[in-house]
Each structure stands twice: as C-alpha cells, then as structure tokens.
Amino acid sequence: MVRDEAAGISTGPEARPGASPRRLSVLSVAQLVEQARQQAGEGAGDFESRSFEEGLEVLARSINDCDRINAAGRGRLEGLIVTHLVRRLRVDRYLAANPDALAAEVARPVFVMGMPRTGTTAVINLLACDPARRTVLRWTLEEPVPPPTADRLYTDPRCLAALEQQERALAEGLAGTNIRFEWADSPAECVHVMNHDFKAMQWEASAPMPAYTEFIYSCDMNSAYTLHRRYLQVLQHRAPGPWALKGPSHALWLPTLLSIYPDARLVWTHRDPCTAVASLCSLMANAHRRNCDEADVEYLSRNVPLGLIEHVQRPMAMLDEIGDRIHHIQFSSLVGGEIETMRRLYAWLGDELTPAVEARMHRWLNQGRQARLGPHRYTLEDFGLQRSAVASLFSDYVNRFDIPAETGQ
C-alpha cells in the first residue's frame, strides 16, 4: 500500500514493539482442507481448482502469527475458513453435475463500488427493489446450493429460517453489530464470494495481520474473480436475470474485474473521506473485538487511511481509459434525494425506472429496517486521527470530484 508520512499518518512498524506470537495451535492448509472434506461428507468430490491455497496459506500463517487473536477468535476464524471450503466444494460439485450452468453468461452486470461507508448499501438496496434485477441475497450467499428458483428467492425455507434466526438474535440483543448488518433477504456484498478463494477484504478486517494486508493489496485476483463468476452462474441457474452487485473493494481490482466481466457497468459512490475513514475504523474495530481481547486502535489508525486511499487512487488512474463506463453518485446528493439519484442512474444504464419500481423504492426507504439496530456513532478522534491529516491524504480525490466536507468528523 501507499505510505504517506507527509499526510501525518504513522508509517512505523506494523507489529507492536516487543510482541511475540501467541500460538494456540498451528493452522495449516492441509489440516483445514481435511476438516472441510470430513464436514462435507461422502460424495463431496474434489475442488475444481486449488487456487484457494495461495491466499489460505498467507491467511493461516497470519492467524498463527497474530498475538492479539484470542482462543475464541482463533476458533471462530478456523470455523469460518472450514465453512468457506465446504461451501466451495458444494459449489464445485453442483457445477460438475450441472455443466449447463457454466454455459450461461453473466451478462452486463452492474457493480456498485467505491470506498467503504460511502452509500453503496443504499444504492444496492434500491436497485434490489426492481424485480427485473438479481442481487446476491445474504441467504443465497450462505446457502447457494441448490440455487433457488426465481419465485422462491424470498420464500425459500432457508431464507425464512435465516430471517427467523436474525429476528431472534435481535430480540435477545445478540445481533452483533449496528454498523453493517445484512438481512437474510437483502443484498449482501458480492465480494464475500471471494472469501472462498481467501483473497478478500473480510479476512483482512478480522484482526491486525500485516502480512495478509500486504498480500491482499498486491496479489493477482484473477482466480478470485473467476470463482466469483462461477458462483453467480450457480445462483442464476434457476433464477436468471441481470445482476446488480455491490462491493466497495471492487474499486481496487478494476482491471481484473473487467477482464472477467468485459461488459460490466460501474457505479462509483463518493463521500467525504474523513467520514469514510472514521466509519471504517469503527467497523473494523468491531471486527477486531470479535476475535481479539481488544481492537488494535494504533494499527487501524495507520492502515485504514492507507487502504482507503488505494480505493480511490486505483480507479482514478483508469479514468482516462474507462471513464465513460463509470456513473458517479455523490453521497451528499443520495441522502434525501434517493429517488432522483436512481432516476439518473437508470437513465445512464438505459433502463426504464417504472412507477411500480419507484413505489417499491419508496417503501424500502420508509421501512426503517436499519433504524432498528440503533445509531452508529464514530469520530476520527476515537482513533487518534486528525481531520487535517486525513483530508491532506485525500486532497487530489476530493478536488477531482468536488466532494463536500461533512461536519462532525
């Protein structure tokens, strides 16, 4: 990643001085794969590709070396790794049994991207109000096989069971976070598909793991996007439709994305970077606390701004080449102007925004589902960051897109 001392962002050693690795038991790729095979049971078959080994090797080593991860967190991460390997086996088995699914193209997908915490969730939920579009619903991300038919996307027993579990967790105060909560029947970040290739930002956010952070910002993402397409081909096998997809970090890998999806349309959301940095620091601190005794605030204050500058510098470097394939949405225009924003987006896409779909969008806006989770409060000062330093780091980006500053950060 870019290191910028002039911006006042610390660039010192990424490990805590004097820290020594605390190893509860050593994770290995072979051991994790064997656990997945046993859990998948007889008839699971073999992996179509072993591409996951590259990222999993770095991730396993990073977990082994992270002295902050506690016993519960280490067990949780091990369980998540095995779950993703089992799911990948099942996807591969489905495609081996249904090769016609691979013959169907993923045509003209829309990708919503940008820095995290910039309104991508609102945009994808509004797009999901259109029955003519497909989105990666949270429950289908977790239960892709067998894929649902179009008429069962919201009534499949797996969807209803997941919703019931979420409602029960909310009632018992166990929902986990009010920062980013995806309902089972709402769009998930499609970049989570790439968790199964172990080249994904969710793993990077799990704990302070500098080796994995460096890996994810520099690795070849071709295998992850190839898997992404295969996953979508499973999900669309019995419920076709043009895809609307959301993943802020697609902004990091546009050359690879466009090589796999050459007819993709891109939607880039923009927001005051100071707000985005503070919000993402808060989100990642919450993720750290799930696996560690406490969040590593020093690590976050150093790495989050540097990671987010990559999210804007990389696509900015491609604007001369692909600028006409990108539609821009300002967060300041989106909030309170959601319907007009969607009208402009639909016009750019060349699609019809019907009165019926607009009505569905209004219903989603008035539903207030996220409000049930409580407010999300955060400041740069919580992480020892100064607005002037963060603003300096992002000045070229802010000036290029004329992004208004938000008060309160």
Image (spheres, rainbow, N blue to C red):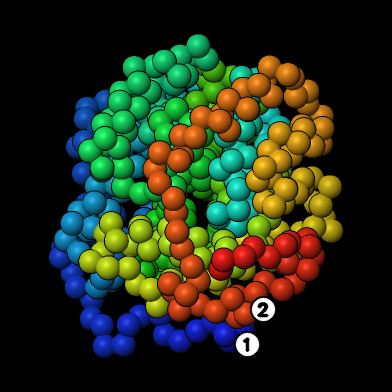
**Front residue of this view, candidates 191 and 116:** 116
Residue at left 26%, top 35%?
171
- Looking at the rendered structure, which numbered label has been put on residue 202? none
| For residue 401, above or below residue 159 | below
Residue 230 picture location, percent across and down: 52, 34
**Front residue of this view, candidates 346 and 204:** 346
**Front residue of this view, candidates 97 and 383:** 383
Task: Label 1, secondary structure: give it.
Answer: helix
Q: Amino acid at mark 2?
A: Ser
Residue 330 picture location, percent across and down: 72, 51
Depth check, mark 1 against mark 2: the one in front is 2
| For residue 171, above or below residue 63 | above
Residue at left 56%, top 68%?
409
Any part of residue 50 in sight? no
Viewport quadrant of the N terminus: bottom right
Task: Label 2, secondary structure: give it.
Answer: helix
Residue 253 picture location, percent across and down: 62, 55
Q: Give the image quarter of residue 350.
A: top right
Q: Is residue 256 left or right of residue 142?
A: right
Residue at left 78%, top 62%?
402
For disc 2, the marked residue is 392
For disc 1, the marked residue is 6
Disc 1 or 2, which lies upstream in sequence?
Answer: 1
Q: Give the image quarter of residue 94.
A: top left
Q: Give the image quarter of residue 154.
A: top left
Q: Amino acid at mark 1?
A: Ala
Q: Are marks 1 and 2 in contact (CB under 8 Å)?
A: yes
Q: How many angstroms separate mark 1 from mark 2 (CA)?
A: 9 Å
Residue 126 picture location, percent across and down: 62, 33
Q: Is residue 33 left or right of residue 232?
A: left
Q: Residues within 10 Å of mark 2 (few under 14, many from 20)?
A: some
| For residue 62, above or below residue 177 | below
